[in-house]
Amino acid sequence: MPPLRETLFSLCVGIAGLPNVAVEGLPTHRGRPAERGVLIVEVRDVQKRPVIGALVTAGGAGTVAETDRVGRARVHLCTTTGSCGVEPDMMVALRVERPGRPLVILSPLDEQVRVPKWENEAQNFASVFVVEPGVREALESGLFLRLVLERIKTEASRAQTILDSRTEWRAPVRVDAARATVARAVGLPVSSLDSALQRWGSRTTDPYEQGLANFYASRYAAAAEAFRASLESHKRARAAEDTAVYRRAMGLGESYSALGQDREAVNAFGEAVSALPNDVDAITALGRARLAVGDAVVADTLLARALQLERRIRGPDEPAVAMCLNNAAAARLHLGDLVGADTLLRRALAIDVRVFGPDNVTAADLNNLGVVRWQLGDLTGADTLLARALANEERTFGLDNPELSDGLRNLSGLRADRGDLAGADTLVARALAIDLRARGGDHPKVAEDLHLLAVLRRDVGDLAAADTLAARALAIDLRARGGDHPAVAEDLRILGLVRRDRGDLAGADTLAARALAIDLRARGGDHPTVAEDLHNLGVLRLDRRDLAGADTLLARALAIHTRVFGSRHSKVASDLLSLGALRRDRDDLAGADSLVTRALAIDLLVFGAEHRRVARDLYALATLHYQVGHLAAADTLMRAALAIDLRSFGSYNLNVASGLRNLGVVSQGLGDLAGADTFQHIGILSLEFHVDKLSRPLL
């Protein structure tokens, strides 16, 4: 889990009955009885020469041991009184230092060792490979280049979980950033390291090494094929080593994740966990893959276990623990536990503030907490956090780096929710300009920018522009990702919503049905994204007066959301609200009132009384009261909803404009004609204000 650091390293030994080797092809150590509580650590450089005089420590209670003339140190995991405080198969942290001459650890990849069963010395043996920073002759070593590629792959894939404006999570694969991190650690220029890696990758014929080379070149389909062939070969071999199976299964899972093939990734990461059951990286990867396929309950269990293991290994205040807290928070968020997610993310941020200082915390910490505060209705606090996250990335990467585009999109989405649609438009237009320059017009990140711009233009009623932008995003994702990728389904969803707003209900229905079909194939029938597709299609069928079809679809969406999130989740509230509209259209106003009241109760519980979703529910309830002639109640509910929107967004906002105009209708029904005229006039001015501010040409 932690980033690569100088003078520190970790390793995983084999389970009883299997040898431990950090690199295949080296001799194993067998035959002698084990000494209880002693781990033999062998430290070598990338020329396989012993490293003499390195100081090695394992676990909090272990002693410091110095490597001898053959590079071996006998590390005692127990105290001098004989108390170990550890049990076989537990993981403990391991550290190595050499005074005056820094070392960079290349293998194994994590800073921990599994406690052996003390049955024979072969099981107590661990191999470690190091390099001195800045030694250019290392570029001629095939072992060095292979280990560097393993490190880059691992660093690129273990990027911290990032939440986006739709509370979807992702763990981006950042090969360029990982290469820069590893190059700094080994003290070599990025260009020199890159050239050597590409030359080595083009020559190797070993399937596992080809997988590493293809992953490094972002050829994820080819990487998956190579890792799969290597994994199957090792599984067929007798006494295949745990660590060898683990590395290949992790590479296969990481390649599938990069391709968006999440169900295949679950199977691969499951094999990695079976090989090394207490490996934090493998458990975390499996948890995040489970989350991606919609299995939030199992994901929550796995990510909580990873957090527990990391705390036990490293202590409570390490950056690796903060990363695990972020992962666990993503699962809590998907389960609808916003308060729990907020608590975990605040603890993660506190750790990184203590370790790095308040000005050097990761942008991911700030971003994720900002997204959750946003969902909790704290728009001001969320804005502060997301703006800080963006500022941190600007200081780190510069003002025109494509690493900024995610932060720009998130802050844009928040500004739109706050009613600053012009500001939101500016931010996403900047993201689009950066991505176009850095990545070209056919990159999936450009599609993400166009997608968000389409959402913004739809929000202000510029449907022609929204249609053009959504169609462009869809065309890019179809070319870049293929017709079965979840990103294509997202594009189809927004394009369908735009077509619905333009009155093309048949076309919108076709698009929504295509999105549903893709997500069913990619995610399975119980995924919350499938429920979102069902909800959208149900609303369209309601618009088309297919009330029976709408009822079936909305009921399915509600059933999935309830199974995944429980009965007190905001998505459940949205389903209830739409089912309420369906009951209203069937003239079952009492049933509609009951459903909308349930939705309001859920949103009050989840978000509190000042949230915009509560205002949405109050508007819906006010509409029902208006329809049955309860004008005074409708007026009270409408004013309460309008007050929330005014406090959240200010006077010049589309929601406020709509609320004012509706309040004018209610006032007219109550006989307050002057008030009705005033409310409707102000509402029209508010609407015109926003349309005018967003009338700029498209990029």
Image (tube, rainbow, N blue to C red):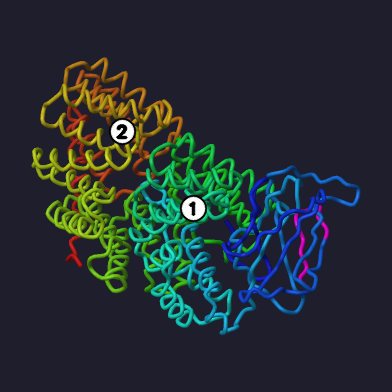
Lower sequence index among marks 1 and 2:
1
Measured from the top left, where is residue 419 in percent x and y?
A: 32, 51
Tag 2 secondary structure: loop
Residue 245 seen in render: yes
Chief secondary structure of the magenta portion: loop
- Residues in magenta, as a range: 54-63
Q: Tell me if residue 693 can be seen.
A: no
Nearer mark to the viewer, of 1 and 2: 1
Q: Compared with residue 195, is residue 495 higher up or lower down, i.e. above or below? A: above
Crowd class of label 2 (few under 14; some 14 to 19; many from 20; radius 10 Å): some
Q: Is residue 186 above or below residue 558?
A: below
Q: Is residue 76 left or right of residue 665?
A: right
User: Which residue lies at the image location 34% right of the left edge and 51% below the top edge?
Assistant: 260
Question: Looking at the picture, how far across and down is residue 381, in whole percent?
Answer: 48, 51
Taking the image as shown, residue 331 lies to the left or right of residue 59, namely left
Q: Secondary structure at mark 1?
A: helix
Residue 613 included in the magenta stretch of the image: no
Residue placed under numbered mark 2 in the picture:
525
> Which of 625/370 is in front?
370
Confirm or deny contact between disc 1 and disc 2 (CB under 8 A).
no
Residue 178, image x and y in percent?
A: 48, 67
State how far apart marks 1 and 2 are (Cα). 34 Å
Q: Amino acid at mark 2?
A: Gly
Q: Which residue is mark 1?
A: 234
Task: Report the side of 62 relative to 46 (left or right).
Answer: right
Q: Nearer the viewer, residue 583 or 35?
A: 35
* Residue at image location 17% in from the left, 66% down from the top: 697
In the image, taking residue 14 as reference, residue 568 lies left or right, namely: left
Q: Is residue 57 found inside the magenta-colored segment of the image?
A: yes
Q: Position of residue 140 (x, y in %)?
A: 53, 81
Q: Which quarter of the picture shows residue 523?
A: top left
Quarter occupied by the C terminus: bottom left
